Each structure stands twice: as C-alpha cells, then as structure tokens.
Amino acid sequence: EKGGHEYFMLKEIEEQPEALANTLRGHFADGRIVLDEQRLADQDLREIDKVFVVACGSAYHSGLVAKYAIEHWCRLPVEVELASEFRYRDPVLDRDTLVVAVSQSGETADTLEAVRHAREQKARVLAVCNTNGAQIPRESDAVLYTHAGPEIGVASTKAFLAQIAANYLVGLALAGARGTKYPDEVAREFHELEAMPEAVGRVLGTAGQVRELAAGLADSKAVLFLGRHVGYPVALEGALKLKELAYMHAEGFAAGELKHGPIALIEEGLPVVVVMPSSKGRATLHSKLLSNIREIQARGAQTIVIAQEGDETVRPFADHLIEVPAVSTLLQPLVSTVPLQIFAAEIAKARGYDVDKPRNLAKSVTVE
Ligand code: F6R
C-alpha cells in the first residue's frame, strides 16, 4: 500500500498533484467559489470586517499564507493565530468576525477549543478540514473540505498543500461574495489555481537533485531557512519538517529580520535555504532577497536557493539551485514547499530515522 515506496510520506509527497486537484475540484461554479457546507448567508460574508485564522503546526503555516492572499484580494484584515494561544488572550470577536479553523484531522484539541471560544463570542466559524464529519467541521457554520485523502505519515505533506489551496478558495469565495479591488488579478489567480496540480507535478521532478543534496548535508548541525512575504511561511514549514523528521536544529526566519539578529548565526559552511519570490512579481521583493543571499554567502554560508525556472539573477549566489515552475507570487508556496518536504525526508532517511513515525509525535493531538 506504500505503492512501491519505502515510506508512506514519500508516497504522500508524490500524491500532491492529485490531492490538490481533488481539493480544487467541484468548487468552481460560474466564476464563483462554492463551499462544501454553508450555513451562512452571503449577506453574512459581506458583513465580515475581520478574519482570524486559527490552527496549529503546519496548518498554522497554511494560515500564514492565507493572510497574504485574503488581505490582498479582499482588503479584509486577517490575523493568524496559534490555536493554543488564541483563547487565552481576550481576542476581539463579534458576529462580524470570521474565524477560519484549519485542521487536517478536525480533532486537534487546541483548534477545537478555539472554535468553541469563537462561537461563544458569536463569531462565524468556517472550517477547512481533511476529515469528513470530524468535530471541528461539525461545530462550524461553514466547511470547505480538503480532499487530500488519508495521510498516514505523521508529518503533514499533502494535507498541508491541500490546506493552502483550500485557504485560497476561502479567499476567492470571500472576494466573490464581497467584491474585490483587483478583479483582473483575482480572475487570473482563480484560473491559475486550476493549473497548480500540473505545476506541483513538475516540481516532483527535482526529487533526484534534492535527494543528492540532502545526502551531502545529513551531518549538518543546523539548517536555516529564509523567506519573505509568502516565502516566509514556506521557510517556517521547511524548518518544521526538518525538526520533526530529522531531529535537526532548524529555524525559519523572515529574511528581513536577518540583520536584527539571526545573521550572527551565519558561519562557514552553514546550510541556509532561501525561498526566492517570483522574479516576475514585485521587483523589490526579489531584489531584497538577492541582497540577503549575497550577505550570507559573503559570510561563508552554503546557500541552497529555491527559485523560479529561468531566474538567472540568483545563479551567482546559489551554491545549490533548485528550480520550481514560475507561478504568481501569491501561489508560490504550492510549488516552493515541495522540495523542502523532500529535503527533510531524505535527510531523515540518511540519518536512519523512521520518516513515517518521528519520535514523540502523534498524528492527531487531541489533548491541549
Ligand atoms: C506537522 C504536523 C503538525 C500538524 C498539527 C495540526 O508536520 O503534522 O504540525 O499540522 O498538529 O494538525 P491538524 O491539521 O490535524 O489540526
């Protein structure tokens, strides 16, 4: 049942194009996005004036990506919160607040309690979930299911990519119900989303190169990950995968924070993964990252750069270059995350660890 793979996780990484296609399928109707269950009127969606995304772990990282998309497409303020912190503060919630709860299992205790707290405060709750009929969707006002299929590997891969895709659909549904300041761009990204399974399929072609790279770095003490804008959550996710699978010290940073502390960590030979933004997108974003790579390379770091195909500007600064298909800036996490999943899994394998069952971790965390 591992389909010829040594580990479920490697099979699940390969299933990502299909997981994405299944998640996107059926939600596009007459230029609008339809949710799976909606016990909310369109009028309610129009009245929303603030969004919270609550989640844990990788699901939280998918929420960070959603913030960039929803704020831009819908001009709605979005806060992304670790579910375990959310209800212990006194978050400002009312009936015009939309709380998006993202959970693969739909049973994560912290996320469920955050949902209950939000509902007590009369907020509207939309669940993004991979498990039909789980507790979180049952207690929500609206549901969008990710159709990644069952995920056996403890570390989330295909469910994470499906969460990102579903979060985009939530953004597009809100933009559809409320209108958008950028109709052309939204229409373009709406259609581009449908092409993403194919793009993710092409990224899988980098597996051999990433495996080789990982084998050479399996004895590293630590790895840093840098990203900006939507590349920042990708960096966080890359670091989380490496921690949980390879038990290696790994940190993700917002590249702009380098000078504010983390640059002190850079030393000769330290592997640093840099997630480059699209070179066709905002020029300033791209050039800022280029100067970050230059800085760390000058200090002796070993640079591993995830960049868009045809981005020649990064070549001189990349000790290792992994090319991913060119897609819109906002959609880039769907392609740039994949090599980082393979990287973590291959390092873990090289170190002799069980990739499907990392120590101390459970697939679904049903205690707080
Ligand atoms: C990381 C991972 C965890 C989960 C987190 C939330 O690889 O799998 O961080 O993402 O425990 O789980 P769900 O999505 O089931 O609420």
Image (spheres, rainbow, N blue to C red):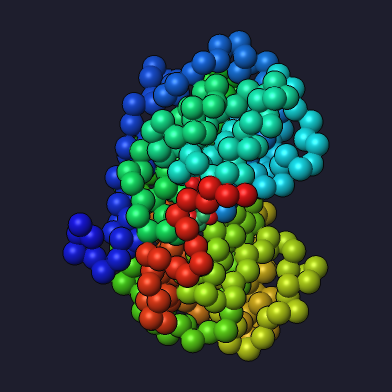
Residue 267, can we see it? yes
148 sits left or right of 285 in the view: left
Q: Residue at x 73, y 39 (%)?
A: 87
The vertical placement of 310 against 31, above or below, is: below
Q: Quadrant of residue 207?
A: bottom left
The vertical placement of 337 against 87, above or below, is: below
Residue placed most toward the observer, 20 or 113? 113
The vertical placement of 336 against 80, above or below, is: below
Position in image of residue 281 (x %, y %): 56, 48
121 sits left or right of 116 in the view: right
Residue placed most toward the observer, 252 or 199? 252
Q: Residue at x 46, y 64 (%)?
A: 340
Quadrant of image for the N terminus: bottom left
Residue 275, can we see it? no
Q: Quadrant of residue 76?
A: top right
Residue placed most toward the observer, 117 or 326? 117
Position in image of residue 311 (x %, y %): 48, 62
Q: Residue furthest bottom?
A: 268
Position in image of residue 23 (x %, y %): 37, 36
Q: Residue at x 34, y 26 (%)?
A: 26
Position in image of residue 30 (x %, y %): 39, 17
Residue placed most toward the observer, 294 or 194? 194
Q: Residue at x 54, y 40 (%)?
A: 102
195 sits left or right of 88 in the view: left
